[in-house]
Amino acid sequence: MNRTQLEYFVSVAELKNFTKAAQKHFVSQTAITQQIQNLEESLHTRLFDRRKRPVKLTEAGEVFLNEAKAILERMNGAVVKLANVSTSESGTIRLGYTNGYENSRLSRVLREYRRSHPNVFFICKSMDCGAMAQALLNEELDIIFTWDRDDIIKRSGLVWRTVEESTLDVVVYNTHPFVNRTRLTRKDLREEKLIYLAPSGELYEDGYYQKYKDAGYEPQVIHYSDDINSILMMVSAEEGITVMPTYITNKITRLDGVECIPLVGANENAAIVAVWKEDCRNPRVRDFLEGIRGN
């Protein structure tokens, strides 16, 4: 039993709907269902009667709901206490990052900072851009790492800085005619079916999309998603090709059937920016940013 399982259970119990609970937590319905099944297995009892619509708590579920809320309240209280610690040696940093950035150097940066600040506690959340931006504005997060073309950086009262720039790769299935190419340009993709990596989970004409138009054509986007693993699986299944930052493709080691080819051309890169509130009251954030600067 873990915190995520308890949070998902409470959400389904209150919303009486697995789909709505998944939307609340920005995950798939499958993820919600699996975590609750794992929770039920650990408790050796059924918590929901899934035969009814809307779903209904069993008698055991009704009893456990109050206990789950109490446990979460105590856990949240503990986190708040940690966040209020303001000495130079202790504290909490609540950090959000765009989907896919977990494959970057971020984990190394966190690890190295923790070694010099062993009493600082990181709470990390992977989120789509829109939800992450709102969490920062609501002071639910202290700092976020997002794409450089995220509209959040235009908001007043926020400060941002580029922390990493990455080249881009075209990811193709291993029977594709491009597979023996050593480099590709945006113009080479004119006739290709594209599976578009959309960090916000929505397709809109941002700067990355505009690059296709600058190459003289409207991209043939057959699907878009912020789920990197699903996109790679679709490429492997020969549904289409995709373009991803190299910090993601560098760590594609377990998926058969795909090849990565450098995308070349002027300004063919993706940048990640750190964003935080100008009046951020968490002293650990400033320390952490200095640590990033040195990496």
Image: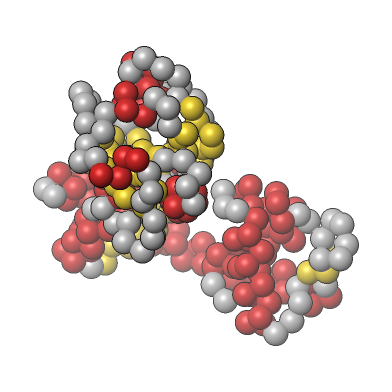
Q: Residue 43 placed where, x, y %? A: 67, 82
Q: Residue 157 placed where, x, y %? A: 36, 27
* Camera-nearest residue between 105 and 79: 105
- Specify whether 247 is left or right of 233: left
* Camera-nearest residue between 205 and 22: 205
Q: Residue 19 placed where, x, y %? A: 70, 51
Residue 8's place in the image compared with 155, above or below, is below
Report the number of discs. 0
Whether residue 145 is visible here, answered yes or no, is: no
Image quarter in which the N terminus is found: bottom right
* Camera-nearest residue between 18 and 222: 222
Residue 58's place in the image compared with 176, above or below, is below
Whether residue 230 is visible here, answered yes or no, is: yes
Residue positioned most to the right: 52
Q: Residue at x 72, y 56 (%)?
A: 18
Q: Residue at x 41, y 17 (%)?
A: 217
Q: Residue 197 placed where, x, y %? A: 43, 39
